[in-house]
Amino acid sequence: MSLQKYQTELIEHGMSVGALKFGTFTLKSGRQSPYFFNAGLLASGPVLDALCSAYASTIASSLKAASDGSPGLPKFDILFGPAYKGIPFAACTALLLHRDHGIDVGYAYDRKEAKDHGEGGVMVGADVKGKKVLVLDDVATAGTAIRGAIDVVRKAGGEVVGAVLMLDRQEVGREGKGMIEEVETLVGGKGRVPTILKMKDLMSWLEQNGKTEELKSMQEYWEQYGVKS
Ligand code: OMP
């Protein structure tokens, strides 16, 4: 599988700042993983540029695919980035969609603690009520975090028409099907959850860079939790 330049750049930036690591990690779902991608460490101008340019390109290609009649994202009004990590990513991606792709959307995010004074509530930024919303998230494994973000938008009256992810770990979801398939069903069907990187892309990169030990552990993990479709 050949990687796109923006995928290789994101992997290499991730490695250089210690956001993407190979070793032994216990995940939120309890699974023991040979790798972990901590998007919270993608925290400098150049790295944010690589990540959010990749989000913006992924969204723009998916919108284009749908307008050509293939599975993809429908037009949307607001990009929603869940607190905390999603906030800068959604803001920067909205900016780059405008500047590099001529796609103008609002952005919104939530607070972890609801405010009971001032403007109140959990939502900040563009009002999602009655609007078509694309949820932007970093990593999805079993799909619990992304479902939580979808619920927040729905509770605020927004219509979630899709989700975009930095990394699809290509694992089995909470219902025992592929996580992506499960989330696609929640938000309107095939093509509604485009991603920048998949676990298999990381494996291609390891192979191309001669990292055989890491690749072997990834293959073993894939045998246990990967979606075979
Ligand atoms: P699920 O909620 O199971 O989909 O796991 C996704 C969440 O797990 C992310 O929002 C992170 O909090 C965390 N996570 C990572 O950030 N990177 C990984 O490589 C793996 C996980 C994880 O725990 O599964």
Image (spheres, rainbow, N blue to C red):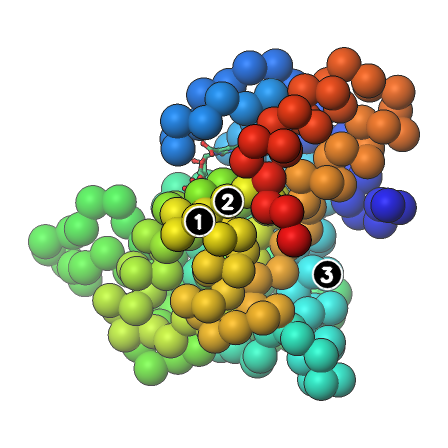
Query: Where is mark 1, residue-wise?
Result: 176
Q: CB at mark 1 closer than 8 A to ligand 1?
A: no
Q: Earlier in the sequence, mark 1 or mark 3?
A: 3
Query: Where is mark 3, residue-wise?
Result: 57
Residue drawn where x is 75% and y is 84% of the image? 68
Query: Where is mark 2, residue-wise?
Result: 172
Q: In the structure shown, which secondary structural element does the residue marked by tag 1 occupy?
A: loop
Furthest residue toward left: 116
Asked whether residue 169 appears in the rendered view, the answer is: no
Left or right of 63 on screen, residue 181: left
For badge 1, the amino acid type reads Gly
For badge 2, the amino acid type reads Val
- How far apart marks 2 and 1 lie (CA) works out to 6 Å
Q: Earlier in the sequence, mark 3 or mark 2?
A: 3
- How far apart marks 1 and 3 lie (CA) works out to 30 Å
Where in the figure is residue 28, as x and y percent of width and height? 39, 31
**Contact? badges 2 and 1 (CB < 8 Å):** yes
Where in the figure is residue 11, as x and y percent of width and height? 74, 34
